[in-house]
Image (cartoon, rainbow, N blue to C red):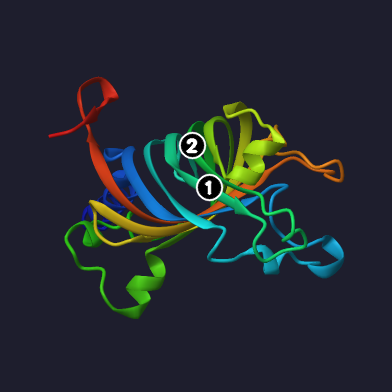
Amino acid sequence: MKRSFLTILMLCFIVSFADAQIWKLKRYEMVFGIGPSFFFGDIGGYSISKNILGLKDITVLQTRFDFNANLKYRISQPFDVRLSLTSGFLHATDVRGSNENRRFAASILFIEPALIGEYYFIKNKAEDSYLFTKGKNTGFIGFIKSLDFYAFVGIGGIGYSIRPNAALQSHGLNPGGFAAVVPFGLGSTLIYSPNFNFGVELTGRYAFSDNLDGYTSQYSSANDVYYFLNFTLTYKLKNGAHGLPSFR
């Protein structure tokens, strides 16, 4: 009787330990995202007195899009680090704002490499389950257990090229350049299957420049910022030889 009890206890311990190590089998992830981009510079927008929360500055005229690719490595269950490469367009226009008579407008093509760290303050319970790897995680409770929520911050740089309209061109501008940026934001991920995740991420960029749109106002008191709202698809890579990712 004692031997049977010890055997059952040992089996329970082994199963629990194996479940806790399942996530380590796929420490690398490829993440692709796409979504709208929003730029807040010195061209366009309402004055603070007319737009306290800044919501009036979010318009279709100012909205463009971005797409990005990431290679992510899981240091531990709550911590990830990722290499990110984002490219796309930003736009600024004086149409619909406090400076409509100025008539400036700029289209900005950019590319942005970044190194970002993530912290999962709510981590899903599904991927540590052997049953989940066999497709047994179903129903509403299974859905709730499959959600992640995380915050992130990093360091990067933006290389940009500005295409001005005639009014801005006549004012004179630097056609492009490079500036350091700080990415930060929040995200959520649905652990859809052992191989795929779906998610959404709201990310801001603080630029160490006030000239991303080619114009700096004498009344400006802050550097330029821009935001992405990205919808993401994650593919998990198995660990290969020597702990490197396997693309097979």
- Lateral position of residue 245 relative to residue 95, left or right: left
User: Which of 30/9 is in front?
Assistant: 30
Q: Is residue 90 left or right of residue 40?
A: left
Residue 5 appears at what percent x and percent y?
27, 58
Q: Three-letter amino acid code at disc 2?
A: Phe
- Return the residue at label 2: 110
Residue 231 falls in which quadrant of the image?
bottom left
Q: Residue furthest bottom?
A: 140
* Side (left or right) of 119 relative to 85: right
Q: Is residue 232 above or below residue 144?
A: above
Whichever of callouts 1 and 2 sits on the residue coming sooner in the sequence is 1
Judged from the image, the secondary structure of the residue bearing numbered disc 1 is strand
Quarter the N terminus occupies? bottom left
Quarter containing the C terminus: top left
Q: Secondary structure at mark 2?
A: strand
In-front residue for pair 115/238: 115
Badge 2: residue crowd in 10 Å (few <14, some 14–19, many ≥20):
many
Question: Eyeballing the image, is 187 above or below 165?
Answer: below
* Residue positioned most to the left: 248
Task: Decide if residue 122 is in sight here.
Answer: no
Up the image or down, 84 lies above or below 149; here it is above
Dot 1 and dot 2 residues touching (CB under 8 Å) = yes
Where on the picture, by quarter, is residue 136?
bottom left
The percent position of residue 66, horizontal first and vertical second, equals 43, 48
Residue at x-position 59% and y-position 66%: 59
